[in-house]
Image: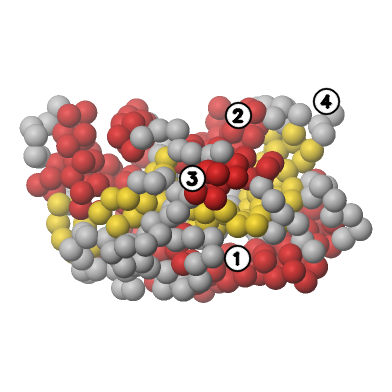
């Protein structure tokens, strides 16, 4: 079979990456999709079982921190495009070990840029370096206002500082070497296959197991939530129709204070688990706050909406129901990712809070 395009998707075994890989493999049978992932604790090939035997799907186990390996991957697969999601992605872990975030998020991104530049140097026509970033690079909002694509960067955590740095490198390679890039900055994703260290899957897991729900600080922090498949659809759109050297913000138009979201989650879980109303809420425990905790994120997603016609397809209530159903129906997945050294992680993160 001949393919008319090859795209390398980095971090394709992770949460968002696996949904992007699935979308591209199924939607574009004439594209060769290469999932490049080193399989950290957050990467799991189980996420892609349903497409692993498709003819247009390939998996390459490699570390983006290894510059030579990245050059070799480019030589072997001759990509037309990169969709770069591989990263260390959890804020709490970045507070424990910032260096890992510098290595993967900054050096790894620069390695990919260098390989793309070397490999595409004679002809950048039709090539695309798509860098997937986060709204956290903009820092924190007060009670009002929204993040625009023109909002200044002001990162507060080692994670967001590393993502901001990688965004700057991508932009600099565009200005200096003519790298044909696009960047998207997205708000908080939720949905199937998210590692249970992040708020939504962690709390689902704890409710199922009757464990306490550790709410940081007073719980009055605000996030803008987007269903992961809506993010994947936006990435497809921007990959194909976004303009070179542009940034697009992606968000759910869906702000929630943590404590309100947690109460909605508890109520749905009581219903699904046939528990008495209010049972899950009793598990809420206020714990020591995250250092440097950003008060509020909220995205203005009007640019991608007006220019590319994207908007979220599911409401938060629909998305949350689908998400909870997925976790309840995939107990084995949760079991497998929480075995191994997950308990050590949980202990070290929460024992002193
Ligand atoms: P994740 O932690 O679930 O997955 C990251 C993936 O990258 C894993 O499969 C992991 O094995 C792989 N990886 C890590 N280090 C690597 C390395 N050195 N070489 C190769 N592969 C490596 O992350 P996610 O939540 O799916 O986030 C994906 C991307 O989207 C990240 O760049 C993140 O910053 C960004 N993002 C995430 C969110 C969110 O809410 N989760 C929101 C906006 C942007
Ligand atoms: O905004 C986009 C970002 O969203 C992504 O770039 C990150 O990769 C992703 O992890 C996410 O970052 P957050 O820090 O916002 O997500 P997290 O799920 O860790 O936390 C969401 C909120 O819930 C935050 O205010 C902290 C709070 N929280 C989190 C955990 C894990 C708790 O109160 N208790 C917890 O145990």
Mark 2–mark 4 Cα distance, whole angstroms, equals 17 Å
As drawn, the label of residue 167 is 1
User: In the rendered view, how is the structure colored?
Assistant: secondary structure
- Residue 205, image x, y percentages: 28, 43
Judging by the rendered image, the residue that carries numbered circle 4 is: 1
Kindly indicate whether the residue at mark 2 contacts the one at mark 3 (C-beta within 8 angstroms).
Answer: no
Judging by the rendered image, the residue that carries numbered circle 3 is: 15
Give the residue drawn at x 54%, y 60%. Answer: 149
Mark 3–mark 2 Cα distance, whole angstroms, equals 15 Å
Residue 239 or residue 19, whichever sits in front: 239
- Residue 324, image x, y percentages: 31, 34
Mark 1–mark 2 Cα distance, whole angstroms, equals 31 Å
Q: Residues within 10 Å of mark 1 (few under 14, many from 20)?
A: many
Is 179 situated left or right of 251 in this image? right
Element marked by disc 1: helix
Quadrant position of the N terminus in the picture: top right
Mark 3–mark 4 Cα distance, whole angstroms, equals 29 Å
Quadrant in the rendering for residue 7: top right
Quadrant in the rendering for residue 178: bottom right
- Residue 119, image x, y percentages: 84, 57
């Amino acid at each position: 079979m001949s393919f008319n395009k090859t795209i390398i998707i980095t971090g394709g075994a992770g949460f968002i990456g696996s949904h992007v890989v699935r979308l591209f493999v199924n939607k574009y049978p004439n594209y060769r999709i290469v999932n490049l992932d080193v399989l950290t604790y957050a990467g799991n090939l189980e996420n892609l079982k349903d497409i692993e035997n498709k003819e247009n799907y390939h998996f390459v186990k490699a570390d983006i921190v290894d510059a030579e390996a990245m050059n070799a991957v480019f030589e072997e697969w001759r990509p037309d495009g990169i969709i770069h999601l591989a990263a260390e992605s959890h804020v709490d872990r970045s507070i424990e070990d910032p260096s890992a975030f510098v290595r993967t998020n900054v050096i790894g991104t620069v390695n990919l840029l260098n390989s793309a530049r070397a490999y595409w140097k004679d002809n950048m026509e039709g090539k695309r370096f798509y860098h997937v970033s986060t709204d956290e690079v903009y820092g924190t909002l007060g009670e009002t206002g929204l993040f625009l694509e023109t909002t200044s960067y002001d990162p507060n955590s080692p994670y967001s500082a590393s993502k901001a740095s990688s965004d700057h490198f991508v932009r600099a390679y565009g200005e200096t070497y003519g790298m044909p890039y696009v960047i998207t900055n997205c708000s908080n994703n939720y949905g199937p296959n998210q590692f249970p260290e992040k708020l939504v899957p962690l709390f689902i897991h704890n409710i199922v197991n009757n464990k306490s729900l550790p709410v940081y600080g007073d719980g009055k922090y605000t996030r803008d939530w987007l269903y992961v498949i809506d993010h994947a659809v936006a990435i497809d759109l921007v990959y194909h129709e976004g303009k070179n050297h542009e940034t697009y913000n992606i968000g759910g138009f869906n702000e929630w204070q943590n404590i309100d979201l947690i109460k909605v989650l508890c109520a749905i879980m009581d219903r699904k688990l046939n528990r008495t109303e209010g049972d899950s809420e009793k598990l809420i425990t206020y714990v020591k706050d995250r250092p440097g905790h950003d008060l509020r994120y909220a995205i203005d997603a009007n640019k991608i909406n007006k220019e590319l016609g994207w908007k979220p397809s599911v409401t938060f209530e629909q998305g949350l129901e689908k998400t909870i159903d997925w976790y309840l129906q995939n107990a084995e997945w949760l079991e497998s990712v929480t075995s191994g050294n997950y308990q050590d992680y949980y202990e070290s993160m929460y024992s002193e809070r």
